[in-house]
Amino acid sequence: VPGILQSTHGRLHPIAVPAPVVPSPADESVQPTEGDDTSAPNATTASRLNRVVCVSSANVGYSAAAKDTEVLPSALEYDATVEEGSTCGTFALTLRMTLEYESAFPEEGMVVWVKK
């Protein structure tokens, strides 16, 4: 993913993931017939699919040690739920992101200030 880095053991490296595959009826040789709407959102293509990316850093304070700035999360989890909206043909996306931070000083208390 261009421009997105991941921290592993204190080192940053580019994230490399395969492009998403969006299934369609054409994958099973099902052809549209007269009256079928093949435009988005009924037939989303991979080229029109956006990615969900969290860009976040935090300031971390400890009981005795000096504070750290621009700390990246040690773990990140996404929970996405798509539900029908309040009117016909509309939908809602609820996205919950859980960020986990690992203390550089586990013997001390830690406070995290997150910036988005």
Image (cartoon, rainbow, N blue to C red):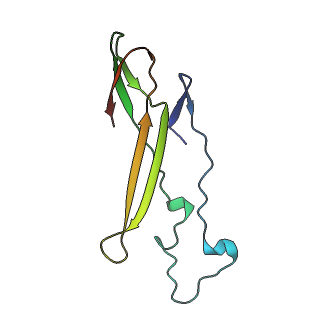
**Outermost residue, bottom side:** 34
- Residue at x 45% of width, y 31% of height: 73
- Residue at x 33% of width, y 32% of height: 114
Where the C terminus falls, by quadrant? top left
Q: Which one is in front, 60 or 5?
A: 60
Q: Is residue 40 above or below residue 69?
A: below
The reply, left or right, for residue 84 in relation to residue 13 is left
Give the percent coordinates (x, y) of residue 84. 38, 70
All told, the count of numbered labels is 0
- Residue at x 61% of width, y 59% of height: 21
Give the percent coordinates (x, y) of residue 71. 41, 25
Q: Is residue 116 above or below residue 94?
A: above
Give the percent coordinates (x, y) of residue 57. 38, 31
Give the percent coordinates (x, y) of residue 12. 54, 27
Where the N terminus falls, by quadrant? top right
Q: Which one is in front, 79 or 106?
A: 106
Q: Is residue 61 above or below residue 79?
A: above
Q: Is residue 81 above or below residue 105?
A: below
- Residue at x 30% of width, y 75% of height: 87
Q: Answer with the quarter of the image where residue 97 lies.
A: top left
Q: Answer with the quarter of the image where residue 99 lies.
A: top left
Q: Which one is in front, 34 or 25?
A: 25
The reply, left or right, for residue 54 in relation to residue 88 is right
